[in-house]
Image (tube, rainbow, N blue to C red):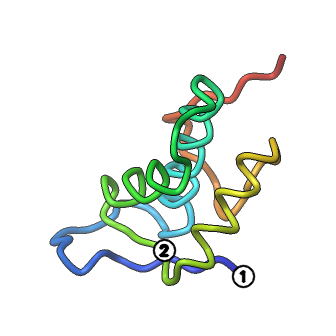
Amino acid sequence: MMKFEIANDYDGELGAPIDDVAQEAIDAAATTYTGDASVDVEQQLRAQLASRGIQAADEESIAQIAQEIRSGHHVSVGRPDGSVEERTD
């Protein structure tokens, strides 16, 4: 199970359940990878999580999510708020 936690240096409220915030970050990383397959997915995922004030609880979660993204699978850990539009085509 993938777990997330508030980053140590984050001082504020997330504004949504942590799994939903993580979902936004995952969707953003996946969208970036879809547009540019040369992107380092792990690094992009860490950056997206950090920009939202959270981090993965362990590196295994990062590796697992990145592998799923590279495999073309949709990773679902929470509900997105709609900030990253999903394409239906």
Q: Residue furthest top?
A: 89
Q: Report the quarter where the N terminus lies.
A: bottom right
Alpha carbon distance from label 1 to label 2: 11 Å
Q: Residues within 10 Å of mark 1 (few under 14, many from 20)?
A: few
**Residue 15 at x, y percent in the picture:** 35, 60
Q: Judge whether 66 appears above or below 73 on screen.
A: below
In the image, taking residue 65 as reference, residue 7 lies left or right, namely left
Q: Judge whether 31 appears above or below 70 on screen.
A: above
Residue at image point 57% right, 68% down: 62
In the image, taking residue 52 as reference, residue 70 lies left or right, namely right
Q: Which residue is mark 2?
A: 56
In the image, taking residue 87 as reference, residue 50 lies left or right, namely left
**Residue 10 at x, y percent in the picture:** 20, 71
CB-based contact (under 8 Å), mark 1 and mark 2: no
Residue 30 got which mark?
none
* Closer-to-camera residue (62/27): 62
Residue at image point 53% right, 78% down: 59
Secondary structure type for disc 1: loop
Q: Quadrant of residue 89?
A: top right
* Closer-to-camera residue (13/23): 23
